[in-house]
Amino acid sequence: MAHALLSASGAEKWFNCPPSARREEGLPDTTSSYAAEGTLAHELADLINRYNLQHMNKRAFTKAFDALKQHELYNPEMEEHCGDFGNYVHGKYQAAKKKTPDAVCLTEQRLDFSAYVPEGFGTGDVIIIADGVLEIIDYKYGKGVTVSAEGNKQMMLYALGALQAYDFQYAIDAVSMTIYQSRLSNISKHSMTVAELKLWAENELRPVAILAHKGEGVATPGGHCRFCKVFATCREHAAHHLAQTRHDFALPPLLSDEEIPDILAQLKPLKLWADKLEAYALAEALKGKLWPGYKLVEVTGRRKYADEAAVAEKLRAEGYAEDEIYTRALLGIGALEKAIGKKEFSAILEPSGLILRPPGAPKLVEDSDEHPALHITNAAEDFDDGFATEADE
C-alpha cells in the first residue's frame, strides 16, 4: 500500500516539525503486535460496516468474517468492540437518513487533499453526507492514548479531502468530526464550518505543508515525536533532553519546590527518548556496528521446560503427587473478561458483587489527567500506621 510523504495519520508530526517528513523518508516502517492488532480491528470494523450498509450479502460477509477469525490476534473482545463501532456508525447513518432521505455513507475512502498539501492523501474510515453536513468518523482501536477530535489535524485533512471529492455534488456548509475509541469509552466530537476549515487550510496548513514537502522549516521537539522514525537519533530532540540535565537531578532535599515540578515534567519524555535511543543502539550493534566503550553480551536466559509432559511424568515416576507439581488458578480479571467476552463478564459477575474495585495507590500526575484529584487533609494522620516519625524512633 502506498503511503503519502505528508500523510493524514502523520499530520500532527509534520505539522509541528516540518523537516521530520523528509528525514523519515525511505526508512522502513516499524511493526509491533499493537499495530498489527489495530490493522486487524480496522479490517473487521470495515467488514461489519459494509455488511450493515448492505454493501455485501450475508454469504460474502460470513466467508470474510470466518477468514478474519483465523488470525492469531483475533479475540472475542475485538469482535465486540468492532461490533459496537458498527452499531454506532449504523445509528448515525439511520439518523442522517431521517433528515435527508438520500444521505450517503462511505467507508474506507481514499481522500485527496493535495489542493493544500503537496501529494497529500489518506484513507477515511467512515464518511456520512446529509443535509449540508459532512461527517467524518475515525476508528481508533488502541487504548494507550486518549485522542481528541478538537484541533485534530488528521481529521481536518480527511474533511478537506472529502470536501474536495463531494462538495460539488452536495451543498456542504459544516463539518463534524468524531473520534471513536470504544476500548477507552471515548467518543470525541468537534464541529466547524466549511469556511473556518478552508481558512485554516489556506493560512496555516498550506504554508507548513510546503515547507514539510521541501524538508525545510524548524525541527521542534515535543509529544508529536513519539512515533517519529528518527526519534532516537534526532539532534534537536537530543539537545532538548540533554538541556534538562542542567538540574543535575540532585536529591530532592537539595532542590527548591519550584524546581521539582519542572523536573517531573521532563522525566517521562526523557525516559521515552532514552529507551528509544538504547533500542536503536542495540539494533545497530546487532547489525555489526561497534560502539566505542560498549559491547554486545549474551545474558543468561530464563529457564524453561523442554517438555512439560515429560517433566511431569518423570516426577510422578519418582513418587511426587499431582498437587505437588501442578497448580490450579482462576484466570486474572482481564484475561477472564477477554476469554468470555466483556458483555457476558459484566452480566454474570458485576451484579453479583464478586468483582471488587478497591481504591488504587496514590499516584502523582499532571493537572491535565482526567482522574479527580485526591484531597489529603492530614497526611500524617492518614498514613499513621504506615510511616514512622523521628519521635517514634
Image (spheres, grey):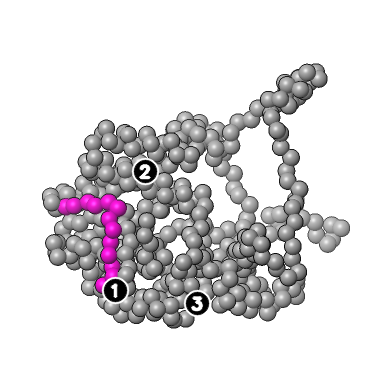
Dot label at residue 44? 2
Category of crowding for the residue at label 1, using alpha-carbon neighbours closer than 10 angstroms: few (below 14), some (14–19), many (at least 20): many
- In this view, which residue lies farthest toward the right? 393
Residue 86 visible from this viewpoint: no
Q: Is residue 160 visible?
A: yes
Residue labelled with disc 3: 220
Circle 1 sits in a helix, a strand or a loop, which is it?
Answer: loop
| Residue at image location 37% in from the left, 56% down from the top | 1
Q: Please state which of the two labelled residues, at mark 1 or mark 3, is closer to the viewer.
A: 1
Query: Element at badge 3?
Result: loop
| Drawn side of residue 165 relative to residue 359, left or right | left
Asked if residue 70 is positioned above or below residue 30 in the image, the reply reads above
For numbered disc 2, what is the local secondary structure? Answer: helix
Tell me which residue sits at (68%, 79%) in the image: 246
Residue 94: give x, y in percent of width and height.
21, 46
For mark 3, does the 10 Å Cα neighbourhood hold few (<14), some (14 to 19), or many (20 or more) residues? some
Mark 3 vs mark 2: which is more N-terminal? 2
Report the front residue among 77 and 160. Answer: 160
111 or 156, which is in the foreground?
Answer: 111
Question: Which residue, given by chain and number where applicable, does mark 1 sit on?
Answer: 116
Q: Position of residue 368 (x, y in %)?
A: 50, 65
Q: Earlier in the sequence, mark 1 or mark 3?
A: 1
Image coords of residue 115 (percent x, y): 26, 72
Whichever of labels 1 and 2 marks the residue nearer the N terminus, that label is 2
In magenta, the rendered stretch is 103-117
Choose between 213 and 51: the one closer to the eye: 213
Query: Any magenta on residue 104?
Result: yes
Quadrant showing the C terminus: bottom right
| Residue 217 in the figure: left or right of residue 89 | right
Tag 3 and tag 2, C-beta contact below 8 Å: no
In the rendered view, does 44 fall on the left or right side of 237? left
Is 308 one of the magenta-colored residues?
no
